[in-house]
Image (tube, grey):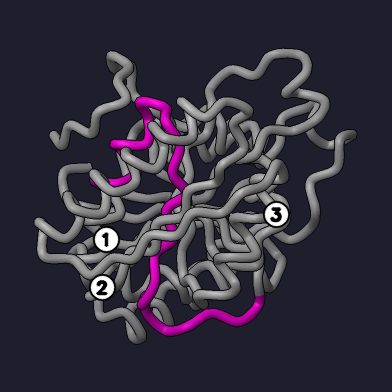
């Protein structure tokens, strides 16, 4: 598919319809086609009819072209396969329930998020602002942080949004904390230099996901940007990564990006 597109998986739950509604502004601002995908949802003729009705409504509300697809197979595998073919700017998907440890052990939504080559916006909450005013970016010293900042700037310019940077001081040594504080200021300056409004906040604590989510609700964030890890070690798999907990618990849409391979640095270097 040559043109920009946004992939929206559709199932029988109301949450995917909420996710679809959240794709409208994104499609308009990026001049993207919306692609509705249904996988194994029953009688194909019924599904095609329902998708057709949704497509008409989505086109009317977004003003953008809408296409439909029906596939058979494992839901998350098929979403990944279709995404790899059409190369969407974003996958926008609704999540309906908390992801339990039992569900993590198979083909599931979080595995799809973790392994996807494409940015995925997961939407769990029921009520969302029509648009985007505040984008929250949790900051750490990893090399992947720079990718989040660039994407946040891109989206902030599209939506006319502010960027809220939050750094969590969970390090045990003073040197690491000083690096993070210095890094936060470099990031803030870079964002401001790009003509985007930004604030920075530093919070001390060990429960990073809770601190991030509490701050997201405090600033009324419309989107949280995180990097998902492709591979988890055994401890992370069973205890859950910070990214997984944020995706699992956030009522605010979460944009997950798989990090690219880059050389590590604690100095902010914009692309």
Report helix, strand or loop for mark 2: helix
Q: Residue furthest right?
A: 102
Q: Residue at x 61, y 47 (%)?
A: 39
Report helix, strand or loop for mark 1: helix
48 lies above or below 207: below
3D distance between C-alphas at marks 2 and 3: 26 Å
Report helix, strand or loop for mark 3: helix
Residue 138's x, y, as percent? 47, 49
221 left or right of 266?
right
Residue tagged 2: 159
Magenta span contains residue 148: yes
Q: Residue at x 48, y 44 (%)?
A: 226
Tell me which segment is drawn in magenta. 126-150
3D distance between C-alphas at marks 1 and 2: 6 Å
158 left or right of 138?
left
146 lies above or below 222: above
Quadrant occupied by the C terminus: top left
239 left or right of 210?
right
The first of marks 2 and 3 along the sequence is 2
Residue tagged 3: 210
Disc marking residue 155: 1
């Amino acid at each position: 598919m040559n043109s920009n597109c946004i992939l929206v998986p559709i199932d029988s739950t109301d949450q995917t319809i909420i996710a679809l509604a959240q794709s409208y502004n994104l499609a308009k601002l990026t001049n993207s086609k919306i692609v509705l995908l249904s996988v194994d949802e029953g009688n194909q003729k019924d599904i095609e009819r329902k998708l057709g009705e949704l497509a008409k409504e989505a086109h009317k509300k977004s003003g953008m072209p809408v296409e439909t697809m029906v596939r058979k197979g494992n839901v998350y595998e098929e979403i990944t396969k279709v995404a790899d073919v059409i190369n969407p700017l974003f996958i926008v998907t609704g999540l309906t329930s908390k992801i339990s440890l039992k569900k993590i052990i198979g083909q599931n939504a979080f595995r799809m998020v973790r392994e996807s080559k494409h940015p995925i916006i997961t939407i769990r909450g029921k009520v969302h602002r029509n648009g985007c005013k505040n984008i929250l970016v949790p900051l750490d010293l990893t090399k992947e942080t720079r990718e989040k900042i660039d994407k946040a700037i891109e989206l902030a310019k599209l939506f006319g949004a502010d960027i809220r940077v939050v750094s969590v001081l969970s390090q045990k040594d003073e040197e690491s904390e000083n690096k993070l504080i210095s890094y936060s200021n470099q990031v803030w300056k870079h964002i401001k230099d790009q003509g985007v409004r930004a604030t920075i906040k530093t919070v001390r604590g060990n429960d990073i996901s809770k601190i991030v989510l509490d701050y997201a609700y405090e600033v009324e964030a419309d989107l949280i940007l995180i990097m998902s890890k492709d591979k988890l070690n055994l401890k992370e798999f069973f205890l859950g990564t910070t990214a997984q907990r944020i995706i699992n618990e956030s009522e605010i849409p979460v944009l997950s990006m798989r990090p690219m391979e880059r050389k590590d640095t604690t100095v902010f270097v914009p692309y």
